[in-house]
Image (cartoon, grey):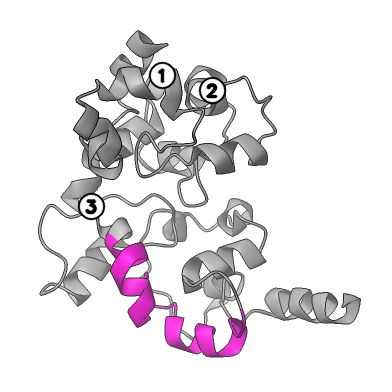
């Protein structure tokens, strides 16, 4: 498994050491540690693969290493490695050959601030809107998750995070408006959209009121209200 993971581009040794200081302090080889113990302890091999989430979402047996499953069959089957990376969409948008791993490609390019893990985040818009705070070479989406979301910065021009938080997130455990909305609409709301312009991240034509393309993904959509009302009635 170690040789395949090393060649896959899915294991980030620097990330692993930075986020697991016990491994660094022990002087252990990061990949060897992950293959022996780390995967069993649900340690992240990179910031976009969440072992515990992947195992439970895709119902893996406890003895199957999640990252190995993703590498050997999960990605080809379209399984998401975490809540905010869609390999099917990413491969289609970037016209990747079948031999190229979408996640590995994204991990290699993410610091260039020109690619996104999902279609509901526009890295160029986000970095331009916060040019003084998002340094060159920083992963724009991770910056949004760790810094921008708490300040209700918009992930795309038409998503009013502050208004969404006020309307929908009272008492919610999820603190990121975009992720809350995605979960509320089933975890992959863009999968049903046929609007190729949206899927290519050209969101300049969308506005808060919504043209025909925007209405299906409006954060204040009737579908979300229907689900919220159904949940309230069930309680």
Please rate how many residues cluster around mark 1, counting C-alpha atoms within 10 Å: few if below 14, some from 14 to 19, many from 20.
Answer: some
Query: Residue at label 3?
Result: 114
Which residues make up the magenta segment?
Answer: 143-171
Distance of mark 2 from mark 1, alpha carbons? Answer: 8 Å
Left or right: 55, with 148 as reference point: right
From the viewer's side, name the closer residue of 80 and 128.
80
Q: Secondary structure at mark 2?
A: loop
Counting residues from the N terminus, which is met first, the one under dot 2 or under dot 1?
1
Q: Secondary structure at mark 1?
A: helix
Rendered-image quadrant of the C terminus: bottom right
Answer whether labels 2 and 1 touch (C-beta < 8 Å). yes
Rendered-image quadrant of the N terminus: top left
Residue 218 image-quadrant placement:
bottom right
Q: Mark 3 or mark 2: which is in front?
A: 2
Relative to residue 159, is residue 178 depicted above or below? above
Q: Residue furthest right?
A: 234
Q: What residue is rendered at 84% in x and 76% in y?
A: 230
Relative to residue 48, is residue 59 depicted above or below? above
Answer whether labels 3 and 1 touch (C-beta < 8 Å). no
Distance of mark 3 from mark 1, alpha carbons? Answer: 32 Å
């Amino acid at each position: 498994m170690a040789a395949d993971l090393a060649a896959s581009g899915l294991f980030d040794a620097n990330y692993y050491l930075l986020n697991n200081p016990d491994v660094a302090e022990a002087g252990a080889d990061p990949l060897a540690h992950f293959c022996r113990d780390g995967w069993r302890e649900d340690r992240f091999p990179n910031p976009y693969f969440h072992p515990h989430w992947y195992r439970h979402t895709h119902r893996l047996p406890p003895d199957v290493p999640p990252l190995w499953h993703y590498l050997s069959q999960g990605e080809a089957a379209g399984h998401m490695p975490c809540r905010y990376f869609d390999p099917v969409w990413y491969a289609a948008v970037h016209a990747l050959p079948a031999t190229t791993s979408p996640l590995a490609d994204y991990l290699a390019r993410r610091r260039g601030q020109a690619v996104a893990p999902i279609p509901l985040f526009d890295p160029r818009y986000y970095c331009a809107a916060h040019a003084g705070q998002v340094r060159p070479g920083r992963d724009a989406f991770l910056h949004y998750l760790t810094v921008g979301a708490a300040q209700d910065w918009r992930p795309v021009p038409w998503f009013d995070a502050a208004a969404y938080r006020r309307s929908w997130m009272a008492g919610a455990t999820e603190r990121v408006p975009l992720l809350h909305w995605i979960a509320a609409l089933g975890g992959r709301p863009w999968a049903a959209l046929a609007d190729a312009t949206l899927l290519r991240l050209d969101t300049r034509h969308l506005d808060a009121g919504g043209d025909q393309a925007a209405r299906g993904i409006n954060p204040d959509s009737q579908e979300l209200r229907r689900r919220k009302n159904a949940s309230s009635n069930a309680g």
